[in-house]
Amino acid sequence: MKIAQQLKEKNIAEYLIYMWQVEDLIRANKCDIDEICRNLISRYPEEEQAALKEWYGNLVEMMRVEGVKEKGHLQINRNVIQNLTELHADLLATTQYPFYNAAYFKALPFIVELRQKNGKEQESELENCFEALYGVLLLRLQKKELSEGTAKAIEVISSFISLLANYYDKEKRGELDLD
């Protein structure tokens, strides 16, 4: 819970990937708060456990209500993608941020390839990017190697998403001029 709050304030991209991981942890524990308590929350200091149980419990309930117990993402996480997508469009529509445009166009061939490979062309480009980054996180957690081509694609996509996250942070602080 504290980690999510800190990441949301510090880096929206890292926050989103973390929250996707939390969704998967909840699913791995069968959306059962008792299993979550045994397998996750019990590892934390006792003074943090009640707040964590409430936080995870709320997320479990949201996943049930929103029908994403088996797959998909919570609306709160889809809202982050939507906000980033809107900012992305605004940044591309202005000539004030040429470095952003350059980073996007450098990543675009990899994004197109991802969309073709995963067959999820109806998803936003940014969601495809986040899925790729999350997939690489899962591979690394499994200690699996990345091909050279995948590593290069992820490096470029990661730089692009990092730049977008920085602009998101600037916009949140009122420091981004899109006019």
Image: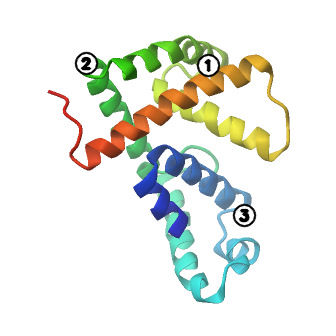
Badge 2: few (under 14), some or many (20 or more) residues near its Cα, within 10 Å?
few
Distance Cα–Cα, label 3 vs label 1: 30 Å
Of badges 3 and 1, nearer the viewer stands 1
State the residue in front, 28 or 40.
40
Of badges 2 and 3, nearer the viewer stands 2
Distance Cα–Cα, label 2 vs label 3: 43 Å
- As drawn, 38 above or below 112: below
Location of the C terminus by quadrant is top left
Q: Secondary structure at mark 2?
A: helix
> Where does residue 40 sit, x and y in percent of width and height?
71, 71
- As drawn, 33 above or below 104: below
Quarter of the image where one finds residue 132: top right
Residue under pointer 3: 29
In this view, the residue farthest toward the left is 179
Tell me the number on the disc at residue 93. 2
Question: What kind of residue is marked 1?
Answer: Leu
**Side of 139 where 159 appears, left or right:** left
- As drawn, 70 above or below 112: below
Distance Cα–Cα, label 1 vs label 2: 24 Å
Question: What kind of residue is marked 2?
Answer: Ala
User: Closer to the N terminus: mark 1 or mark 2?
Assistant: 2
Q: Secondary structure at mark 1?
A: helix
Residue under pointer 1: 114
User: Closer to the N terminus: mark 3 or mark 1?
Assistant: 3
Is residue 2 at least partly visible in the picture?
yes
> Where does residue 79 sit, x and y in percent of width and height?
38, 45
Is residue 123 at least partly visible in the picture?
no
Q: Secondary structure at mark 3?
A: loop
User: Closer to the N terminus: mark 2 or mark 3?
Assistant: 3
